[in-house]
Amino acid sequence: MKVLLTRLTLGLVAVIVVVLAGYLVLIALSLLRANRNLDKLAGGLEAVRDNTASLGSDISAINAAAATLNDGLSRIGSHLKGVNQSLKA
């Protein structure tokens, strides 16, 4: 009986070790895949940085034009709300 219990225990331990090893291999593969994706992401971000470096001096002009456009569109929106309210009445 003692021999049987020892063999069952060793068998169970072996199964647990194999399952854990399998999970560790899967985790390692996932980490390698994530590392490749992070390398691609870092390369893409560097390309964005390099491609937009020349916009630094133009950003203030773009922001000013966008603010002017926003003001104009806000005024148009308030006029349209007034027209909508007068048409409902």
Image (cartoon, rainbow, N blue to C red):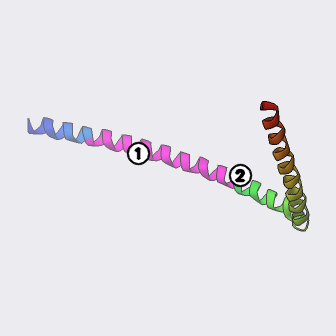
- Residue that mark 2 sits on: 40
The residue lying at 80 percent from left, 41 percent from top is 81
The crowding category of the residue bearing disc 2, from other C-alpha atoms within 10 Å (few below 14, some 14 to 19, many at least 20), is few
Task: Kindly identify the amino acid type of the residue bearing the numbered disc 1.
Answer: Ala
Does dot 1 land on a helix, a strand or a loop? helix
Q: Amino acid at mark 2?
A: Lys
Badge 1 density bin: few <14, some 14–19, many ≥20, Cα 10 Å: few
Q: Outermost residue, bottom direction?
A: 57
Residue at x 25%, y 38% (from the top left corner): 11
Q: Quadrant of residue 61?
A: bottom right
Using the image, determine if residue 80 lies above or below residue 44: above
Q: Position of residue 13 (x, y in %)?
A: 27, 43
- Determine if the magenta segment contains residue 16: yes
Which image quarter holds the N terminus? top left
Along the line of sight, which residue is nearer the eye, 38 or 76? Answer: 76
Q: Magenta segment, which residues?
A: 13-40
Residue 75 pos. (x, y %): 85, 50
Q: Is residue 21 magenta?
A: yes
**Relative height, residue 31 to residue 84 (above, below):** below
Residue holding disc 1: 21
Residue found at x 82% / y 45%: 77
